[in-house]
Image: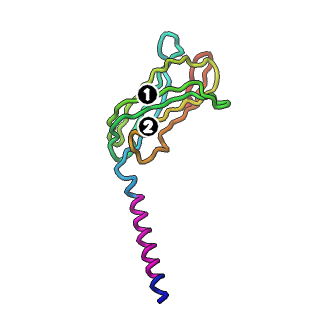
Amino acid sequence: MRKHPIIGGSICAVVLLIMGSSNTVLASEGKPDLIVESINIVPAGDSGRQFQAIAEIKNIGNADAIGSVDLYYAFHRLILLMTVFSDSCSDSIHLAPNESTIVTLTGMQNLPYFGFFIFFCQVNTNRWIEESNYKNNRLDKVCMAILGQWFIRS
């Protein structure tokens, strides 16, 4: 009589294990995965201190990324990590797997003349497009400004 509860519990555990493992695999199938492949800063405007932030967005997932996507960028001082400024934009995209696109954002703020900064770009911050991995949506670069000239570590 005592063997039946053990057998029933064992069968139940095996069924739950199989169901749990198959659901995990199915959850990541057929979804896009957006990353920021590269970022750059290009001077824009007459002042020489306004800029364009250029980001290359790539879909490394196994399904098309279709919809509205947002791009957020910010400059933080390397010491104290204070935000100097930040901005965002949104655009409609249709990226097949392994396709990429360029998104350009013109900054109206004047860039600082001196200092060390962390410049980062993050795509799909509002999660408007469902992805298989949201943890790889950000790219950080260390920058240095000397007399208004910006240098980005590659």
Coloured how? rainbow
The residue lying at 43 percent from left, 73 percent from top is 14
On the image, the x and y values in percent for residue 121 come to: 50, 32
Q: Residue furthest top?
A: 46
Q: Nearer the viewer, residue 86 or 144?
A: 86
Mark 1 Cα shell of 10 Å, populated few (<14), some (14-19), many (≥20): some
Q: Nearer the viewer, residue 119 or 67?
A: 67
Instruction: Identify the image quadrant of the C terminus.
Output: top right
Element type at marker 2?
loop
Compared to 75, does 97 lie above or below? below
Judging by the rendered image, the residue that carries numbered circle 1 is: 89
Q: Amino acid at mark 1?
A: Cys
Asked if disc 2 and disc 1 are in contact, CB closer than 8 Å, the reply is no
Judging by the rendered image, the residue that carries numbered circle 2 is: 124
On the image, the x and y values in percent for residue 12 come to: 43, 74
The residue lying at 44 percent from left, 24 percent from top is 105
Residue interval drawn in magenta = 6-24
Q: Which mark is residue 136?
A: none
On the image, the x and y values in percent for residue 82 come to: 63, 29
Q: Magenta segment: does it hold 139?
A: no
The residue lying at 63 percent from left, 26 percent from top is 116
Is residue 85 toward the left or the right of residue 137 in the image? right
Most prominent secondary structure in the magenta stretch? Answer: helix
Among numbered discs 2 and 1, the one appearing first in the sequence:
1
Q: From this viewpoint, is residue 10 visible?
A: yes
The residue lying at 43 percent from left, 40 percent from top is 127
Mark 2 Cα shell of 10 Å, populated few (<14), some (14-19), many (≥20): many
- The alpha-carbon separation of the residues under discs 2 and 1 comes to 10 Å
Q: Nearer the viewer, residue 144 or 23?
A: 23
Q: Magenta segment: does it hold 12?
A: yes
